[in-house]
Amino acid sequence: MSQDFATYKAFWDHQARDRLNAMLAVDGSGDDEVLLCTGQYTADQVVAALDLQPSDRVLELGCGVGRIGSELAARVGHWQGVDISQKMIDVARDRLSGFSNVSADVLERTRLDPAADQSLDKAYSVAVFIHLDKEDLFLYLQDLYRALKPGGRIYFDTWNIAHPVGFRRFAYEVNRFRDQAPVARKDVARNQFSCPQEIEIYLQQAGFEVAMMLADSPWIQAVAVKPGGSEPLEQIKGKLAAQRDTIIYGAGWTEFFDRLLQTIFEGVHPQALYDSLRARQGDREADMFATWLRGFWKLSEAQFGPAPAA
């Protein structure tokens, strides 16, 4: 159990003890098709949020198995993935071995030692800060500020306790530990939750200017800029507003996620959700969720019966 692990590194190395478990830890499916689908969806968000350019040097904090990096490497000058888990990095290096413009480095502490001062144009972190103590979240923001060039940009997300579905996700976490001793509730990789005001304070105190803060879903999505660049902040905000629909987890995503929580935590059979997702075939979010749900269902056939083929 996760409470048996004293450090992030020990926990995530255990989760990534082999390739299949590393993939399971990243998106819960253990399926290459699902990994590709979710990676493409998230990569589109990152490209829009960071306005990625072919010459950019980009860092992913918490790169896992390279789910997103494998989709972005061909679009940037250099992609650098860092992760606290050596075993995750080993899988990422293997999956990205066909690219000549990538590097993947293991972290030893809450510090981006592989990234030199002002060496990065852009950086991002997806579904990583949800597992960090707030002190570590802020330390990483400070070090991202150090490693970015003036005008450099970051994008990240974390759980949004201020949204009704985000709070419902928090409530599932609370109920999971209701009858356990406090030490069990403090396991090193537990899900943690924030509100938009808290994230804005962390960013400002780390030195960033907030360019976008989205909180209309169970996720807080933040884009921030290191001052000193040539592009005015208001101009960056205008471009981000034009890309909002690509960046945001939309209303459909929130609806599907809310229903998915019932399957994961309450054992509600996934058939009705899957049917409604397939009925919206062609919708970007519905298609991604249908692919993910099918992968999850394959792992849960003992509980739910045979998963649909497509």
Image (cartoon, grey):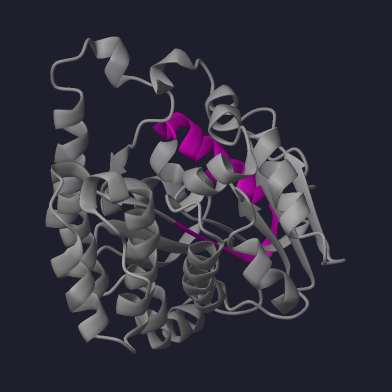
Residue furthest to the right = 100
Visible residue check, residue 242: yes
**Residue 143's x, y, as percent?**
63, 42
Taking depth in this image into account, of 231 and 55 the one nearest to the observer is 55
Residue at (43% x, 84% y) in the render: 243
Taking depth in this image into account, of 205 and 59 the one nearest to the observer is 59
Please give left or right for residue 225 compared with residue 215 in the image: right
**Residue 166's x, y, as percent?**
20, 52
Please give left or right for residue 18 compared with residue 244 in the image: right
The answer to which quarter of the image holds residue 50 is: bottom right
Please give left or right for residue 72 compared with residue 118 in the image: left
Q: Which residues are magenta?
A: 132-156
Q: How many marks?
A: 0
Residue at (84% x, 66% y) in the render: 101
- Quick check: is 140 in the magenta stretch? yes
Q: Quadrant of the N terminus?
A: top left
